[in-house]
Amino acid sequence: MGGKMPVPRRPSDCPVLIKGGARFRAAAPSCSGDAKSTCAPWKMDTEISVAQTDKQRRPAVGIGYRSAIAEWTRANLKCFDLLKVTVDHCIYGSATQRAEIFDLVGRIPINAHGIGLSIGTDVPLDLAYLDQVAAIVEQLRAPTYSEHLAFTRVPGRDLANLLPLPKTMAAAESIIGKVRTIQSCIGVPFLLENISYAFD
């Protein structure tokens, strides 16, 4: 698609799925050029957060921060209520990428999200990594830290995918123990995000 990216409209113009009291992601519709399709032309990670069912409140709408659209995002911060920042980009990203992200602190609310925890892997948590996450969450002034309820690696190998956990008591007990450890290290609420998968 050539030319400038269109500015997404406010939430009332972008149809999203809302469930009272729930917090989840929804993909914004693609821009097809007709009057009914007014959102940006890519799939946005849209954070839907409904704090209560009061009709005077509306869901918050945000976008996942990506370097590829960093300039556009920064120019259109007024269109969003929050940003979702991947903490791993702050840990492993370039100095320029980190500076771009930290420059946004205080300009818009930021939710911290991780992709490197692999909470479902049947090994102890990487406490050194968790300490780095805690420091980044504090620097971002993020009110929450989220991760996927999945495993992304096994010992010695990164699987490069979000894989579902076995539905066993052993797996559940392992996750509960890890969540308690995470909560003791991170100074904000820890959220687990369900994944989608095509097999059981």
Image: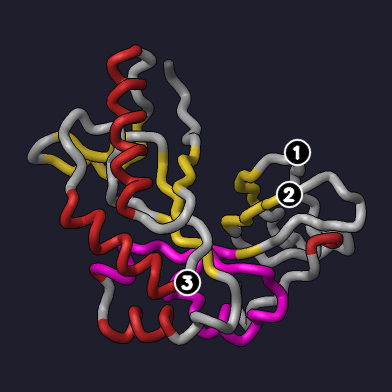
Quadrant of the image containing the N terminus: bottom right
Q: Which residues are magenta?
A: 63-91
* x 39%, y 65%: residue: 137
Residue toward you, 66 or 182: 182
Outermost residue, left direction? 156
Q: Does residue 72 appear anywhere in the picture?
A: no
Density class for disc 1 (Cα within 10 Å; few <14, some 14-19, many ≥20) is few
Q: Nearer the viewer, mark 2 or mark 3?
A: 3
Task: Give x and y (percent) for residue 74.
Answer: 57, 84
* Residue drawn at the location 35% of the way across and 80% of the way down: 97
Q: Nearer the viewer, residue 89 or 38?
A: 89
| Residue 159 sits above or below residue 134 on the image | above
Mark 2 surroundings: few (<14), some (14-19) or many (≥20) residues within 10 A? some
The image quadrant that residue 187 belongs to is bottom left
Mark 2 touches mark 3? (CB < 8 Å): no
Relative side of 135 to 34, left or right: left
Secondary structure beneath label 3:
loop
Query: Crowding near pointer 3: few (<14 within 10 Å), some, many (20+)?
Result: some
N-terminal-most mark, 3 or 1: 1
Asked if residue 80 shows in the view, the reply is: yes
Q: Residue at x 34, y 18 (%)?
A: 166
Mark 2 and mark 1 in contact? Answer it, CB < 8 Å.
Answer: yes
Taking the spot 64% from the left edge, 80% from the top edge, the residue there is 77
For label 2, the residue is: 50
| Amino acid tagged 3 | Arg
Could you tell me the amino acid type at mark 1?
Answer: Lys
* Mark closest to the chain's N terminus, 2 or 3: 2
As measured in the structure, the alpha-carbon distance from the residue carrying label 2 to the one carrying label 3 is 21 Å
Q: Which labelled disc corresponds to residue 19? A: 1
Local SS, label 1: loop
Q: Which residue is mark 3?
A: 141
